[in-house]
Image (tube, rainbow, N blue to C red):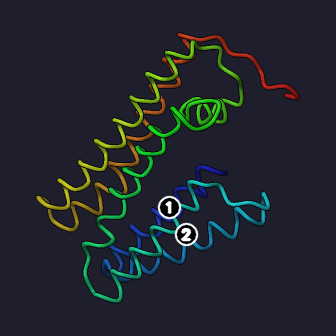
């Protein structure tokens, strides 16, 4: 259910783009993100930080796109989002008890992973690098491809790259570390 909720704004964006144009798709994406936040809050009485960050960026860049009638603003949103994630992964080396990658992977797997701290730190740097590359790839597509190619890259390319990267990390981690159920599970 959570994955469908996270992908719904992208699906709405894609459908609106092909049904109308980028500006209608941008407005649709903005509305869909607000709906996701409302559903998050209704279900959990909180808004997950990544959803909140993404929604703020969609609303800011989407508003600029619509008011200035300039598609580049919404095209920059994925790059800004990914680069902010990269900064967050890097900062988690010094802030908090565990690197961000460890927190994400334990939530995703619903289990604690027994992995050496140095390995978590290296993996954390790998994730930061991955997000820097994704942001750069988005800019390259924005600059060198058509709008339609960018829309498809944004919806399918970035999503599939992220899913493949996370899946590879899960497989790699489950082979390198040992899993222990979280207390109370």
**Is 70 left, or right, of 6 in this rendering?**
left
Q: Is residue 20 above or below residue 121?
A: below
The residue singled out by tag 2 in the image is 33
Q: Position of residue 138 (x, y in %)?
A: 26, 54
Circles 1 and 2 in contact, beta carbons < 8 Å:
yes
Look at discs 1 and 2 and give the one toward the viewer.
1
List the residue tagged with mark 1. 54
Observer-nearest residue: 9 or 182? 182
Q: Nearer the viewer, residue 104 or 27?
A: 104
Q: Determine whether the residue tagged by mark 2 lies in a helix, strand or loop.
A: helix
**Where 26 sits versus 158, above or below?**
below
Question: Nearest the camera: 7 or 52?
Answer: 52
Label 2: few (<14), some (14–19) or many (≥20) C-alpha neighbours in 10 Å: many
Residue 90 placed where, x, y %?
44, 37
Residue at disc 1, secondary structure = helix
Residue drawn at the location 78% of the way across and 57% of the way down:
44
In the drawing, does residue 4 fall left or right of residue 123?
right
* Extreme residue toward the bottom, this view: 67
Q: Residue at x 42, y 52 (%)?
A: 84
Residue at 79% x, 62% y is: 45
Q: Position of residue 183 (x, y in %)?
A: 85, 25
Q: Residue furthest right?
A: 184
Task: Tell me the distance, in whole angstroms, between the alpha carbons under discs 1 and 2.
Answer: 8 Å
* Viewer-side residue, 35 vs 131: 131
């Amino acid at each position: 259910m959570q994955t469908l909720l996270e992908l719904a704004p992208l699906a709405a964006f894609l459908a609106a783009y092909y049904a109308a144009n980028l500006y209608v798709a941008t407005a649709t994406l903005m509305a869909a993100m607000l709906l996701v936040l409302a559903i998050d809050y209704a279900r959990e009485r909180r808004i997950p930080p990544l959803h909140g960050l993404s929604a703020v960026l969609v609303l800011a860049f989407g508003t600029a796109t619509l008011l200035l009638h300039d598609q580049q603003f919404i095209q920059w949103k994925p790059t800004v989002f990914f680069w902010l994630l990269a900064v967050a992964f890097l900062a988690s080396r010094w802030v908090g008890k565990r690197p961000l990658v460890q927190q994400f992977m334990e939530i995703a797997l619903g289990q604690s992973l027994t992995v050496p701290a140095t390995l978590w730190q290296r993996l954390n740097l790998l994730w930061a690098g991955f997000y820097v590359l994704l942001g750069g790839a988005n800019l390259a597509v924005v600059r060198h491809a058509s709008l339609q190619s960018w829309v498809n890259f944004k919806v399918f390319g970035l999503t599939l790259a992220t899913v493949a990267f996370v899946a590879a990390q899960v497989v790699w981690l489950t082979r390198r570390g040992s899993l222990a159920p979280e207390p109370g599970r």
